[in-house]
Image (cartoon, rainbow, N blue to C red):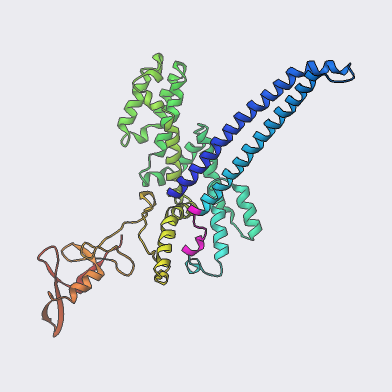
Amino acid sequence: MEACVAVEKEIDKILSKFASIRENGSKNIEETIEFLSSIKPELEQAQTDSEFNERQLFIIHLAVAKVKETVSRLASEHRDLHSSVSKVGKTIDRNFTQDYASTSFDRVFSGVDKEKLLNQVICQHMYRHGFLEIGEELARESGLEIRENSKQPFMLLNEILEKLRHKNLVAALEWAQTHREQLMEQNSSLEFKLHRLQFLQLVSEGPEKQAEALGYVRRHFPPFVHQHETDIQNLMGVLAFIPYGVHNSPYKKLFDPILWTEICEVFVKDACALLGFSVESPLSVCINVGSISLPALLNIKQVMAQRQVAGMWNAKDELPIEIDAGREYRYHSIFACPILRQQGSDSNPPMRLLCGHVISRDALNKLSSGNNVLRAIRTGQSVARLKCPYCPREFDSSEARQLHF
């Protein structure tokens, strides 16, 4: 972030100089034009004479000197500006590391089909965002065979979403009614919110639409009474203010334009969940998380190189440091062992003890081999008895069960 701020400061300086040079240059040129225009009539009189008089020669020399001064000043400012522009490139080179490849491993993304998989991800990204022609061209050039049924859901969702952005609810309502059962299983309120916006559109058109709005409520709202009773009551209150102007009523918040932005977000979220897709494109997530992580990785890579321990980072399943990408990019629960203070992993998963307390497998193994192990004889064998570190309960290490979040 500091590197971006440093470059931004240099760019601001350049823009400021551009504005200053443009203003000064225009002013100097206008003054020169005005001066030449003022001496033009007097020099035109010399056309009838054979020679210029002393005054006219003086005016000509003065005009030539003024033009040369103006040109020289503009050239000097241009040279100064060119020098400042070159400083931006030097600032970028100084603040940004160009060796981005040093933070990646080819083994992370390996396989004979890796190029094909990457092209598929890019094509899917284009389809998700409605860039059908770009996706089709990429698929053609890379030789991919994209099935029609894999493109159709994205095409339909983008078509409906575009209509929602233009406050057209018809297509979205048809889609929600077609998938009503699946949406209800997800406890989705999408269909109700669409009907609410349709009702508010009718109400906002004035008293002549009051009967139609009331009829719309009777036809479409009964299935949602139990789940959205309070919201429906508020909508009924809007009817009382139609003659006086609903936008100046106590219910004016219901007509906030932000509700249209929210319905687009709700539609994308619920539709993607219904179709088994993530809300964000996997490619977008990878690029965003990579952009967040790259500065920290470049810094730690440089430190490791200076200390000659670069070989320590050679695993593709983990990073040399912990990087917080933000809550929006957390897709699973994170378990940290309360004893060893280590984050759980596939090789060190959380283990539930009989008493209900949870520790990591490494902590369980350390307890098993510690000095506090009691020995008891069962069926002729020696079995390790452990005491929970948080309560008096004792148990066998084999009785602990792995937890899956």
Query: Does 395 sit above or below residue 79?
Result: below
- View extreme (bottom): residue: 380
Report whether 383 appears left or right of 254: left
For residue 95: magenta? yes
Instruction: Please count the marks in the image.
Output: 0
Report whether 23 appears left or right of 231: right
Viewer-closest of 174 and 121: 121
Q: Main secondary structure of the magenta part?
A: helix
Query: Does 150 sit above or below residue 177?
Result: below
Which span of residues is magenta-colored? 94-103
Rendering coords of residue 116 (x, y %):
57, 63
For residue 262: magenta? no
Rendering coords of residue 49 (x, y %):
88, 17
Viewer-closest of 21 and 221: 21
- View extreme (top): residue: 244
Any part of residue 141 in sight: yes
Q: State which quadrant residue 198 falls in.
A: top left
Residue shown at 40%/20% (left/top)? 247
Residue shown at 46%/19% (left/top)? 209
Residue shown at 68%/27% (left/top)? 29
Picture quarter with the C terminus: bottom left
Viewer-closest of 275 and 92: 92
Q: State which quadrant residue 28 falls in.
A: top right
Report whether 365 appears left or right of 297: left
Any part of residue 160 in sight: no
Q: State which quadrant residue 223 falls in.
A: top left
Report whether 245 appears left or right of 364: right
Rendering coords of residue 350 (x, y %):
26, 65
Query: Does 70 sit above or below residue 148?
Result: above
Rendering coords of residue 52 (x, y %):
84, 20
